[in-house]
Image (cartoon, grey):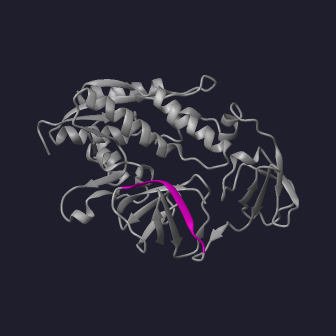
Amino acid sequence: MSNKKTVFVGLSGGVDSSVAAKRLIEQGYNVVGVFIKVWHPDFMVCNWEAERLDAMRVAAHLDIPFLTCDAEAEYRDEVAKYFIEEYKAGRTPNPDVMCNQHVKFDAFLRFAQQKGADFIATGHYAQKITKGNPLQSGLHRGVDEGKDQTYFLWTLSNEQLAKSLFPVGNTPKEQIRQEAEAAGIPTATKKDSQGICFLGHVDIPEFLSHYVSLEKGHVLNEAGEIIGNHQGALVYTLGQRHGFNITTANNQRTALYVTTRDLQRNTITVSAQKSLISNEDSVTLTNLQLRKKVETGDELEAQFRYRQKPFKIKILSLKDNQLILKPLTEVEQPASGQSCVLYQSSLCLGGGVVIK
């Protein structure tokens, strides 16, 4: 705690960042609220003006200065373009990870530092622990297991982490809402935001159709028989169970999952069983960001998806910015382009992008 340090808080217009700002004020920091303006395409409606107004109302309620950080260019070039190009390449992107890497903890951090801030803060459900056992210092899961957001923060460097604060990560979401209501914060009962702004309320195929030529194709069963149709093989990912039409009888109403895609033939294959990888298989990661040293032979935990139950892995090799790991249990097969995040108990070590 310091009575002198200045913190720029990314006020999204939601309850989490609002309580983050409130707590930092109570801890004695000089707090400035900042709304981060991002890009959205002209053909879609984005409610950023309403979100900014909510953020302004929170700042006024807390009696703190309010600024706007224009990160449209970074969001367009590093998040939206990445999203489009990854789908074009047949991979499954994670724009939320890229938004944190290039917008919130890069463009916003630079904006804050240029204006004299010592730290930035967000409403992410994560914890930064800097005291005690040096082996345990770093980015840790939030205490609310259902809301933990460290999966989306794996790209943060130690330098970015050192300049970042996560004031709500040590509290369950329900208590955060109660705290906001008790303090009379205008956003106390506001619903959590869903999705990413440049998509608005439009689904992925409709969005991508403005940038990629999508053609309807066949849905196949495991025997290669046509059982339905889809909107374009490009927009599906492994394990997906919706967004395609089954036109044959499915009397038992069994859930069907995408198991393979053939982009050349524009087909997807579905099955009642998800594609799994066993402890005989390996997964290769690239674009690594590791805040703690890991070595060949280390046994850790990993996640391929947000809210996926962590599973044990063993590192087989680590060289040339590539890490090869082996799951120690049967687990759902990840799609190329997905993030794989590594953990040591609650400590988020970093991660990489799945390439195979």
Question: What segment carries the magenta color?
Answer: 281-290
Instruction: Mark yes or no: residue 200 visible.
Output: no
- Residue at point 32% right, 29% down? 111
The furthest residue to the left: 3
Work out whether residue 194 or residue 229 is closer to the camera in this orientation and state it.
229
Q: Name the quarter where the N terminus is drawn.
A: top left
**Count of numbered labels shown in the rendering:** 0
Q: Position of residue 320 (x, y in %)?
A: 47, 58
Q: Main secondary structure of the magenta part?
A: strand
Q: Is residue 84 magenta?
A: no
Q: Quadrant of residue 9?
A: top left
The answer to whether 295 appears left or right of 167 in the picture is right
- Residue at point 58% right, 74% down? 330
Q: Position of residue 188 (x, y in %)?
A: 36, 39
Q: Name the quarter where the C terminus is drawn.
A: bottom right
The answer to whether 243 appears left or right of 25 in the picture is right
Q: Quadrant of residue 332?
A: bottom right
Q: Position of residue 52 (x, y in %)?
A: 41, 26
Work out whether residue 327 or residue 60 is closer to the camera in this orientation and state it.
327
Instruction: Mark yes or no: residue 224 visible.
Output: yes
Q: Position of residue 2 (x, y in %)?
A: 12, 42
- Residue at point 35% right, 45% down? 177
